[in-house]
Image (cartoon, coloured by chain):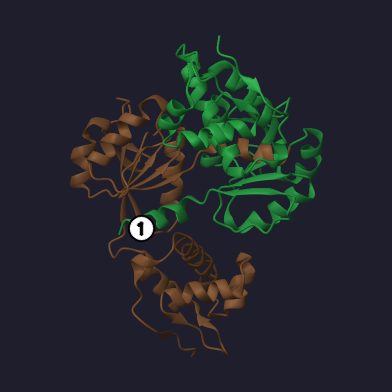
Chain colours: A green, B brown
Amino acid sequence: MAKIEKLTIPLQKKLPPRSVERLSKYRRLLSMLYAGNGEFIFSHDLARLLNLTPEQVRRDLMLIGLSGNRRKGYSIRALIDIIGETIDKEEGYNVAIVGVGNLGRAITAFIRKAQTKLNITAAFDVDANKINREIAGVPCYDILRIPDMVKKLNISIVILTVPSDVVKDISDLLIHSGVKGILNFTSVHLDIPSDVYLKDYDIITSLEEIGFFIK
Amino acid sequence: MAKIEKLTIPLQKKLPPRSVERLSKYRRLLSMLYAGNGEFIFSHDLARLLNLTPEQVRRDLMLIGLSGNRRKGYSIRALIDIIGETIDKEEGYNVAIVGVGNLGRAITAFIRKAQTKLNITAAFDVDANKINREIAGVPCYDILRIPDMVKKLNISIVILTVPSDVVKDISDLLIHSGVKGILNFTSVHLDIPSDVYLKDYDIITSLEEIGFFIK
């Protein structure tokens, strides 16, 4: 059996965002290969499948303390586990979705279907027809209960899909309530403190950007 | 009235992606201000609202050949128009959505509600219950008709929300059919030719990345 050598205890906080992103992608690809009965993989195969260089892949895996076996490559199962140890919290992350219109509802269902350590534990909305019911399998609370429920449910990440005119107030409320990560699907720029990690998924801007570059 | 001076005919193809992204954001913000009866704006106000430096904003606007009036700033209406002239095609872009499950359907509705030059003109799916019907207000065709319909409807941009196992085949089909831009909501890495512009919106990877950095 190919041996995976654990070189050092990695300084996990020091990983660059791009490496974390790639590690997450490696794991998803590896999980598919593992489900298809794959056992071992070489860094150059992993690289080819993801259109990266083998050096890049090896560097990322070295960052989490791994080097492969020259003859057989990496054990897929071990890679999945060790990437998981590095990038997952033991108990997973509690995620809430704020704004459960069509888009919020679809994203919730999408994430619930993917097998990850992300637990969508709450939805928030202003609509009385949604509050105190389950939306896409997740209990929906009044948006005014954000401070209370974020603490109670230990929610650290929020997906924001609310109308533009309320984004600012709601993001302030979320940050005051202790939320540490935001995936922002609105087109509104969020002014956030440096200890909050933000990613913008601005669909319209991205499509306009694509449009410009293919003109 | 504040005068907007058009300095030069800009070399539009030379704009950096980040500038295009910001110009698109400026326009959206300006449209909201205009709707609220705003007439003029200074670059430093635009900068403050978007958390940028005034120099950055002025540089972006210079790139499209604009300089403001020192006393009154920029005319909001003129800014909106000239950004539009720069980043929009005259007739707008024809966009298709490929895969109209819950997420595809919600994204379609979301884009149709936003007022942009993006025309969602077709949806594609494999589901016989969707084919030849309207989904979220858009006619849905069999995925096998992609080559035919992409040409007939002059579709240049595609939003990809299909299951992982078919992404590769479908993206090959799209590229062969002449699609030039892809917004990829799947977690599968696309290997695309250099004349196709790709943006990845990989929700799960992004949430895992956020999770890692707030750990």
Residue A62's spot in the image, x, y percent?
Answer: 61, 32
Towards the viewer: A106 or A76: A76
Q: Residue at x 50, y 36 (%)?
A: A55
Q: Residue furthest front?
A: A70
Depth order, front residue of A10/A125: A10
Image: A164 above or below A79: below
The residue under the point 58% across, 58% down is A188
Q: In front here: A95 or A50?
A: A50
- The quadrant of the rendering that contains the N terminus of chain A is top right
Q: Quadrant of residue B150?
A: top left
Residue furthest top as drawn: A1
On the question of residue A81 being in view, the answer is yes
Q: Is residue A173 left or right of residue B101?
A: right
**Label 1 neighbourhood size at 10 Å, few (<14), some (14-19), many (20+)?**
many
Q: Which residue is mark 1?
A: A213
Residue B110: image x %, image y %? Answer: 46, 47
Tell me where residue B65 appears, x and y as whole percent.
Answer: 41, 79
Q: Nearer the viewer, residue B208 or B77?
A: B208
Q: In the rendered image, which quarter is residue A153 located in?
A: top right
Which residue is found at the position 60% from the left and 65% from the top? B50
Question: In the drawing, does residue A1 fall left or right of residue A91?
Answer: left
**Residue A116 visible (yes or no):** no
Q: Is residue B147 above or below residue B46?
A: above
Q: Where is A25 relative to B33, above or below? A: above
Q: Dividing the image into 4 quarters, which one contains the C terminus of chain A? A: bottom left
In the visual, does A73 lie left or right of B122?
right
Q: Secondary structure at mark 1?
A: helix
Q: Position of residue B72 (x, y in %)?
A: 56, 87
Query: Given the image, what chain letter belongs to the residue carrying mark 1?
Result: A
Residue A163 against residue A49 in the figure, above or below: below
Q: Looking at the picture, which amino acid does disc 1 mark?
A: Phe
